[in-house]
Structures are given as C-alpha cells and as structure tokens.
Image (cartoon, grey):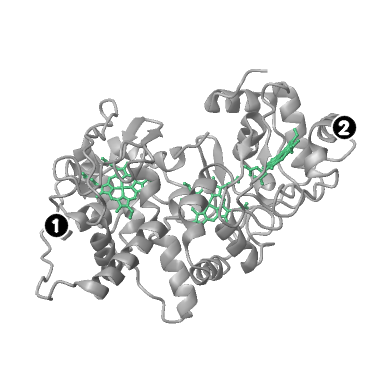
C-alpha cells in the first residue's frame, strides 16, 4: 500500500466551510527585480545544483510523478476522503506543464497556493513551502526550468461537487497559510534554526505529523502525531512513551538516512519520504533536523496502566505472538537491530491509535529501501491467516508487554482497519 493519502487528508472540511473569506486576494503581482545579469557557466550550474537539493528536501518528485519514466509530469493520484486529486504536470512543457511560467507565477503556486486554475488544494503542501526563503525559491525555480518537457495533460481536480469548487479555498488559504517566510530565532543556534527551517519548510514534516483541525488547518499542538487513512504518523516531541524521548539525535539521523536504526524501520508513507527525500539530504542537514526535534518539549499525553499479564486476552495474545511473530521479533520484543523493529518500548506501539500496527499486521509491509540499507526486510501479511479477534489479541498483547502500555484493540477496530485498507479477508 504505497499511498500519499495522509497528505491528501489535509483537504479538510474547510473546503466548504472556509468560503467566507473569499474576496481577499494575495498579492500575486509582486514584482521581481530582474536587474541582475542572468547567470551562466559555473555559477548557473551551482545554482541549479542548489535548486535540485531544495527539490529533494521538499520531495517534489514523489507527488509529481506517476510514471517513473516521466519525472515531474504529474498525474499522481492523491486519495482524499472527498475524492481524488491529481498532481500537476510541472515539467517545462509549454502546453501541459509550466514551460510558459515566470518566476512570479511559480512563487504564487509554491509559496502562496495559487496555481494555473486558481487556488490550489492543500494536498500540495504550500502552507509549509510558504516558509521557503527567497534564495531557495529562486534556486528551485532555476532547477525546475531544466526539467525536460513532457507532454501530458492532467485534470487535477477530480473531486465531486462541492469540493471541486476551487474558489472556496480562498478562505482556507487565508486562514491557514500565512505566506510567511521562515524567521530565524536569534536565541537558538544556527544548527537548530537550520533544522527548524528544513522540518517546517521544505521537509513539510508537519503535513503528516501535526494534527489538523476540523477545517484541515494545523492545530497548535505541533508534531504531536496524527492518524489518517490507515497510518499513524507518530508524535515527534520528546515524550518518552509515545514520542522520540528515548531516541538519541544519532537514532534520528540514522532513521532519516537509512530508513532504519537500532530500534525501528520506516514503513508506509514514511518509507517513501525517506526513499525519495531524506536519504539524499546531507548528514549535516539531518543532524540539524534531529537537533531541532530534540528541542520540542514533550507532549503531555498521559500514560495508561498496562494490562495485567495474566488476563485472558494477554494469555491468548502471547500464544499467537510466540507462534507467529517471535521468530522475527524475538520473545523479549527485542527485534533485530537495523532490520526488524524492536517492539519493546516502541512509541508507535504505545500510540493511542493503533492504525499503523493494524495496517502492517494485516497487509504486511516493506521497510524503506535506501542506499544505506538496500536489502530491507519484509513484514509478512497476516490478514489472510488470523481472524479479526486474533489480530486484536496479538495487537493488544504487544501493546501491553515489555514495558509498553496502550489501550485494548477490539475485533471491531480490526474489522474497520481491514475495510479501510482493503486487506485480504481471513
Ligand atoms: C504531497 C504532495 C505534493 C508535494 C510534496 C508537492 N506537490 Fe505540487 N502539487 C500537488 C498537487 C496535488 C497539486 C495540484 C493541486 C491542485 O490542483 O489544487 C500540485 C500543484 C503544483 C503546482 C501548480 C501547477 C498548476 O498548474 O497550477 C506547482 C507549480 C507545484 N505543485 C510545484 C511543486 C513543487 C516545486 C514542489 C516541491 C517544492 C511540489 N509541488 C511538491 C502535490 C504535491
Ligand atoms: C507523507 C507523510 C509523512 C511525512 C511528509 C513525514 N512523515 Fe515521518 N512518519 C510518517 C508515518 C506514517 C510514520 C510512521 C511510520 C511507521 O509506522 O513505520 C512516520 C514516522 C517517523 C519517525 C519515526 C517515529 C517513530 O516513533 O517510529 C520519524 C523520526 C519521522 N517520521 C520524522 C519525520 C521528519 C523529520 C519528517 C520531515 C522531514 C517527516 N517525518 C515527514 C509520515 C510522514
Ligand atoms: C518474517 C519476519 C517477521 C514476522 C514473522 C513478523 N514480523 Fe513484524 N515486522 C517484520 C519486519 C521486517 C518489520 C518492518 C517492516 C516495515 O517497517 O515496513 C516488521 C514490522 C512490524 C510492526 C511495525 C512496528 C513499527 O514500529 O512500526 C509491527 C507492529 C509488527 N511487525 C508486528 C508483528 C506481529 C504482531 C507479528 C505476528 C503476528 C509479526 N510482526 C511477525 C518482520 C516480521
């Protein structure tokens, strides 16, 4: 299940409700001083290379490519709860891409959410990109102009009425996307500022890791985790039960660089983010992201009491675990470093929402394949083998063993997860 649906979920109810703000427009006629000599030779090449790096850090290619032979030609389908949205062709083709655009139009789309058809849906993460510095936007534009043209017509908006009404997004745009460039905090080190910029801006981590309010805008509790469409993007604050409190900076760097570290393996949408984007970032930048994440104060989720080990559900769960899972995850929940996740003390297991666990157990999952870890292991699917009741029992067991503590998972929860992700019937 390779999906970008989490981001798609951003297209919230706001599409309807935010119509009120229409009429206030962004200044799209901003004039760009064009009085500098156009670059050429070495200087131009360096600028394009810097732009290519911004594109990688922003993961533009992941959403804008559906056919790997036609990078940036768009047509990648993002399922939202309201219907499909396709990404645009952003190659330099003059008819179907952005080959006729100037830098002002590019800026309007990328940092202000105004595209060739009007307001863009926030499935394009422009609220994060609004933080891009002028220099990075400028370099990115230089790079985008070098993308070979591909003729490919995309009809982006495939939503049913009323969600297909782009003008309604005007109000959304006004409420949530403030078009503010990143502002450095002088009381913090250069490294932490760089990390904050990368995470909040190009890396758009908040697009998946920050909960959305009813209108699809970011909630105030930044990076405290969110669940959408079958995956739970965990809390990235220093909470030691459900967040990264027990991870060192090096653990974070390893995870973003290799897709795996001593305790965890990236799967689903995060495996994609690692494969396309973070593994190609410099270790210096990844260390900056890690340093920034380590400054996030622990969220205050309360820790529930673990189920007692001798309850009947825990006894049955343990039997299923020992026969089906322990060969790989080890009976102590220790896993195998850099290959099979440690289940003991794992924040993803303690998360109040078991969405990722159920997706992985029901459908199986491929760990991120990276240059640093080219032979990622696979978690087999158990959807065909275990009943809803059995999946509930084993999931409840792993969530309440080895120091973990989290709510009981019911057979109903599993049945719903099965339906959501279309997992094989038992
Ligand atoms: C999470 C997915 C996602 C990522 C990442 C993403 N885009 Fe988009 N982008 C989209 C979607 C979906 C649309 C179409 C939205 C719509 O039509 O409302 C879009 C639209 C656009 C448009 C408007 C095209 C037009 O004709 O109006 C431009 C330009 C664009 N993206 C450039 C970029 C660049 C540059 C990056 C990286 C900095 C990027 N996108 C990253 C999903 C994404
Ligand atoms: C497209 C959505 C998406 C984006 C964008 C994204 N993440 Fe994630 N992230 C996830 C999901 C989903 C998981 C859970 C993966 C799993 O269960 O294996 C995750 C897991 C993680 C984890 C592991 C946490 C744990 O407890 O296991 C870290 C660290 C992380 N992300 C950091 C980041 C950073 C830093 C960024 C921005 C550079 C980012 N993510 C961007 C969706 C996303
Ligand atoms: C053949 C080896 C193997 C077996 C058997 C196996 N797993 Fe896994 N498991 C893996 C691997 C490899 C991953 C990492 C895959 C990924 O991240 O995409 C994983 C990932 C997971 C995760 C996700 C952990 C996280 O932090 O995101 C959970 C939960 C899990 N397994 C539970 C189970 C349960 C429960 C069983 C038995 C019903 C089981 N596994 C059996 C190899 C195995």
* Element assignment for label 1: loop
- Cα distance, mark 1 to mark 2? 65 Å
Q: Check whether the beta carbons of the residues at disc 1 and disc 2 lie within 8 A of each other.
A: no
Q: Relative to residue 4, is residue 133 drawn left or right?
A: left
Location of residue 77 in the rendering, given as x and y in whole percent from the top left corner: 36, 34
Q: Which mark is residue 315?
A: 2
Q: Nearer the viewer, residue 181 or 270?
A: 270
Residue 268 appears anywhere in the view: yes
Would you place residue 320 above or below residue 42 in this image?
above
Q: Relative to residue 155, is residue 401 drawn left or right?
A: right
Would you place residue 384 above or below residue 274 in this image?
above
Q: What is the quadrant of residue 4 in the picture? A: top left
Q: Quadrant of the C terminus?
A: top right
For the point 18% across and 72% down, which residue is it?
Answer: 39
Location of residue 198 in the rendering, given as x and y in whole percent from the top left corner: 43, 64
Residue pointed to by mark 1? 102
């Amino acid at each position: 299940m390779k999906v970008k649906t989490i981001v798609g979920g951003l297209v919230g109810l706001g599409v309807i409700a935010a119509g009120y703000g229409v009429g206030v427009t962004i200044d799209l006629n901003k004039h760009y001083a064009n009085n500098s000599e156009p670059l050429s030779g070495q200087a131009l090449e360096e600028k394009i290379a810097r732009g290519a790096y911004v594109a990688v850090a922003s993961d533009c290619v992941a959403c804008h490519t559906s056919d790997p032979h036609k990078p940036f030609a768009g047509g990648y389908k993002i399922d939202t709860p309201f219907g499909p949205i396709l990404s645009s062709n952003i190659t330099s083709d003059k008819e179907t891409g952005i080959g006729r655009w100037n830098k002002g139009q590019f800026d309007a789309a990328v940092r202000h959410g105004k595209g060739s058809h009007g307001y863009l849906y926030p499935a394009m993460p422009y609220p994060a990109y609004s933080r891009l510095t002028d220099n990075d936007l400028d370099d990115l534009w230089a790079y985008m102009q070098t993308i070979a043209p591909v003729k490919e017509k995309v009809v982006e908006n495939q939503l049913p009425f009323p969600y297909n009404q782009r003008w309604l997004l005007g109000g959304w745009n006004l409420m949530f996307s403030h078009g503010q460039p990143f502002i450095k905090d002088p009381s913090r080190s250069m490294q932490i500022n760089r990390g904050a910029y990368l995470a909040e801006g190009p890396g758009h981590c908040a697009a998946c890791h920050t909960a959305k309010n009813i209108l699809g805008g970011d909630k105030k509790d930044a990076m405290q985790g969110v669940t959408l469409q079958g995956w739970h993007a965990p809390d990235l604050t220093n909470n030691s039960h459900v967040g990264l409190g027990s991870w060192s900076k090096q653990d974070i760097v390893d995870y973003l660089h290799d897709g795996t570290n001593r305790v965890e393996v990236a799967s689903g949408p995060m495996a994609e983010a690692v494969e396309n984007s973070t593994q190609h970032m410099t270790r210096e930048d990844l260390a900056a992201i890690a340093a920034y994440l380590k400054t996030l104060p622990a969220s205050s989720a309360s820790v529930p009491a673990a189920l007692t080990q001798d309850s009947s559900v825990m006894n049955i769960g343990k039997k299923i675990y020992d026969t089906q899972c322990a060969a790989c995850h080890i009976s102590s929940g220790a896993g195998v470093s850099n290959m099979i996740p440690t289940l003991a003390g794992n924040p993803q297991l303690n998360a109040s929402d078991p969405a990722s666990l159920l997706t992985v157990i029901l459908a199986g999952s491929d760990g991120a394949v990276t240059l640093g870890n080219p032979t990622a292991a696979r978690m087999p699917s158990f959807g065909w083998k275990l009943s809803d009741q059995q999946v509930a029992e084993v999931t409840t067991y792993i969530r309440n063993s080895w120091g973990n503590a989290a709510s009981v998972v019911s057979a109903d929860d599993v049945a719903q997860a099965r339906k959501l992700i279309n997992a094989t019937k038992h």
